[in-house]
Image: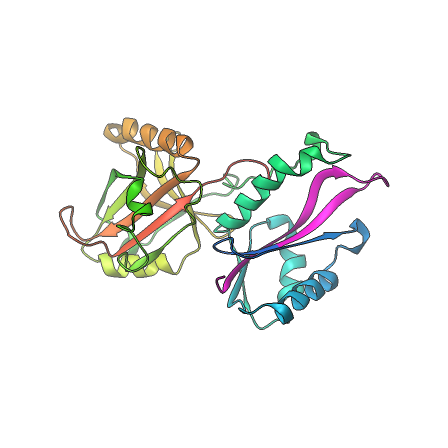
């Protein structure tokens, strides 16, 4: 059980006998080793009851969280108010892979078999938030060049890539990652200031990387709805960008971004294994 938790409080595509939507509070840790679920009556969904539920869990938990992440912009105010009095850092963030995976499991194995289930009640979360305009990076943070690259999936399972050898960065849960025979595609940034760039990126809530073929830009999505322009997409890179996006879809959203000083450097300064979710949750 980790000290980074992920929370969701939202309605589900299920109507009760009273004709009102089922609401649930879900709480898990970043590795999915701890899970807590509490159904809520729709008229009891408020910051006070959410805070009380989280406080009850904190009292019983052997590991206290140093931060709690949540990804729903629609619930921003209520969750921020609910968790503000607690001694924990609250992070609006789409870096909630364990929570997304749990919600997908419940959609596939629980909700659709419940009386009152109606898939039309699912609301699009818009996890990539293309509705926002991307922000440009300052020159000091921009890498001089980048390349589309790939790694065999087994390097994440056999420990060749692990939390100890990536320096800065983070590895998302690999439960759904193919164990062998597949390639995970990614982006490597090259910079003379690689250590500084990696340190800056490590302070962000990196959700996923997207090659925007129409906008001809390589975008990094962070927190709940921010987009940052990493680099332009040149004509010569269009095919590689298409392959990157195709591979990301085929690998259930798994991809990565890394930072190093030069192409033949032996070590990276930072590495992030990411997963993009696009379904309604």
Name the spot of residue 35 as percent of width and height, x first. Answer: 59, 55
Looking at the image, which residue is at 71% across and 66% down?
A: 52
Looking at the image, which residue is at 62% across and 41% down?
A: 106
Q: Main secondary structure of the magenta part?
A: strand
State yes or no: residue 187 in magenta: no
Name the spot of residue 170 as percent of width and height, x first. Answer: 37, 55
Name the spot of residue 157 as percent of width and height, x first. Answer: 33, 46
State yes or no: residue 21 in magenta: yes
Question: In the picture provided, is 3 more to the left or to the right than 240?
Answer: right
Q: Would you identify the image quadrant in which residue 234 lies?
A: top left
Is 152 above or below relative to 120? below
Viewer-closest of 192 and 53: 53
Segment tinted magenta in the rendering:
1-26
Viewer-closest of 256 and 205: 256
The single residue placed furthest to the left in the displayed view is 264
Viewer-closest of 147 and 36: 36
Looking at the image, which residue is at 32% across and 54% down?
A: 138
Viewer-closest of 186 and 108: 108
Is 100 above or below relative to 1? above
Looking at the image, which residue is at 43% across and 49% down?
A: 173
Badge count: 0
Question: How is colour applied across the structure in the image?
Answer: rainbow
Q: Which image quarter holds the C terminus?
A: top right
Question: In the picture provided, is 267 more to the left or to the right than 163?
Answer: left
The single residue placed furthest to the top in the displayed view is 239
The single residue placed furthest to the right in the displayed view is 18
Name the spot of residue 226 as percent of width and height, x first. Answer: 47, 49
């Amino acid at each position: 059980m980790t000290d980074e938790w992920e929370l969701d409080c939202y309605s589900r595509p299920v109507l009760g006998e009273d004709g009102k939507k089922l609401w649930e509070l879900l709480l898990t840790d970043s590795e999915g080793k701890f899970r807590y679920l509490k159904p809520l009556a729709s008229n009891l969904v408020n910051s006070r009851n959410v805070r009380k539920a989280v406080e009850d869990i904190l009292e019983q938990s052997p590991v206290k969280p140093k931060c709690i992440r949540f990804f729903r912009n629609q619930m921003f105010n209520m969750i921020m108010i609910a968790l503000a009095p607690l001694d924990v850092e609250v992070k609006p963030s789409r870096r909630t892979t364990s929570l997304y995976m749990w919600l997908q499991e419940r959609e596939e194995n629980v909700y659709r078999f419940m009386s009152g289930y109606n898939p039309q009640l699912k609301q699009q979360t818009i996890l990539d938030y293309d509705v926002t305009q991307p922000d440009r990076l300052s020159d000091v943070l921009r890498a001089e060049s980048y390349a589309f690259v790939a790694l065999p999936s087994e390097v994440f399972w056999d420990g060749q890539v692990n939390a100890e050898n990536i320096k800065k960065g983070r590895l998302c849960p690999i439960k759904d990652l193919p164990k062998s025979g597949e390639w995970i595609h990614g982006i490597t940034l090259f910079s003379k200031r690689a250590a500084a760039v990696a340190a800056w990126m490590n302070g962000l809530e990196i959700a996923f990387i997207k090659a925007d073929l129409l906008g001809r830009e390589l975008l990094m999505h962070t927190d709940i709805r921010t987009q940052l322009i990493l680099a332009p997409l040149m004509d010569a890179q269009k095919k590689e960008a298409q392959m990157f996006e195709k591979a990301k879809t085929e690998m259930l959203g798994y991809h990565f971004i890394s930072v190093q000083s030069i192409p033949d450097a032996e070590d990276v300064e930072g590495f992030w294994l990411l997963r993009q979710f696009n379904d309604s949750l």
